[in-house]
Amino acid sequence: MKEELKIFCAGSNPDLTTSIAEVLGLELNSLKIARFSNDNITVQIQENVRERDVFVVQSLTTPVSEQIMKMLITLDALRSASAKRITAVIPYYSYARSDKKDAPRISITARLIADLLKTAGADRVLTMDLHSPQVHGFFSMPVDHLTATALIADYFKNKPGREKMIVVATDAGGAKRAGRLAEHLDVPIAIVDKRRISDTEVAQGEMVGNVRGKVCIIFDDEIATGSTILETMKTLKEAGAGKIYVSAVHGVLCGDAVPRLQESGMEELVVTNTVHIAEEKKMNNMTVLSVAPLLAEAIRRIHTGESIGEMFPQELGMKPQS
Ligand code: R5P
């Protein structure tokens, strides 16, 4: 495997990429990203990739446009260098939120980025917990869509008060996701009705489910400004909830999300490392679970041609259409 498989970091997740390589028993492969005096980016692959199975890790995190350009140029450089197959490993695909035409004359940018990745040279994509599962279909190449739900569930299985736990979805769209976490934990769910007012503001409406005295786990795909979580917490507190844990796969934590969450009175924040979390953003009661073993196993299986679905029997099993 050592000779055949190559793993590169295109800039956004150096720690995660190093961990993935370590789990696979490989060295991280080397590329050089530089900038010309006119601000153009240049990427040079530092080793031979001819006829190799190559994986490039890059989450679309801030500065998003720059990370996208680095990824596209890296993919193109690898293709020009005659890599046999190139997999774009995108642990966090931020543009997945731009997945519908919900205002006049806008772009469905999740599809545009999918097209750009293909044009640049990606043969396949490996990603995690897309904002909506339909985004998978925007790619005209094979996509392996992993989920960190079981990883997060395993973490909460060790918490006290399981018999009083309830998983809370922050809106109707997240109910299926919350339901899967609840299934893993074998606990009920509640759903809070969210209305998005603007990019940074949300308002909560009615809640379905009884949270009085319960240990609540608010579960979302991502936390950006933190407004959704804070509004949900308000609703839960008004409804008499007990301890409130907050969990999301992608800890984007933009702007002043960290101080706002820190003051919220939550028991603990549990996220994963799909998004690199800078030291200054780490809170005392924050746990960052590593998705490196999951991604490494998926990369190994893609390389050897084994099933990825078998990694997620509970989520990806054949289910009746709903
Ligand atoms: C959107 O519907 C997502 O599921 C999250 O709820 C959203 O991205 C969170 O954004 P924010 O933290 O800015 O409220």
Image (spheres, rainbow, N blue to C red):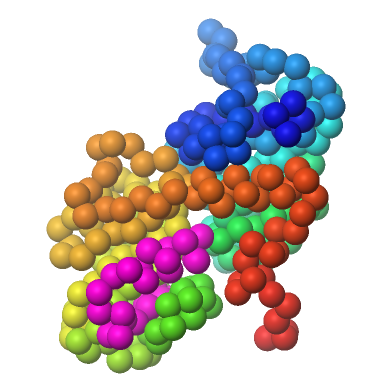
Q: Is residue 56 visible?
A: yes
Range covered by the magenta-colored residues: 148-171
In which quadrant is the N terminus drawn?
A: top right
- The answer to whether 203 is drawn above or below residue 251 in the figure is below
Residue at the location (70% across, 64% down)?
Answer: 309
Of 7 and 207, the residue lying toward us: 7
Q: How many marks?
A: 0
- Location of residue 197 by image quarter: bottom left
Q: Is residue 109 visible?
A: no
Image coordinates of residue 281 in percent, x first then y, are: 27, 42
Residue at the location (67% across, 45% down)?
Answer: 299
Image coordinates of residue 117 in percent, x first then y, are: 71, 40
In which quadrant is the C terminus drawn?
A: bottom right
Magenta stretch: includes residue 90: no
Of 302 and 201, the residue lying toward us: 302
* Image-based side of 278 in relation to 152, left or right: left
* Image-based side of 96 in relation to 223, left or right: right
* Image-based side of 279 in relation to 12, left or right: left
- The answer to whether 132 is drawn above or below residue 290 in the figure is below
* Image-based side of 62 in relation to 265, left or right: right
Residue at the location (34% across, 87% down)?
Answer: 207
Residue at the location (70% across, 29% down)?
Answer: 2
Magenta stretch: includes residue 169: yes
- Location of residue 50 by image quarter: top right
Image coordinates of residue 61 in percent, x first then y, are: 48, 41
- Location of residue 51 by image quarter: top right
Image coordinates of residue 319 in percent, x first then y, are: 70, 81
- The answer to whether 115 is drawn above or below residue 244 in the figure is above
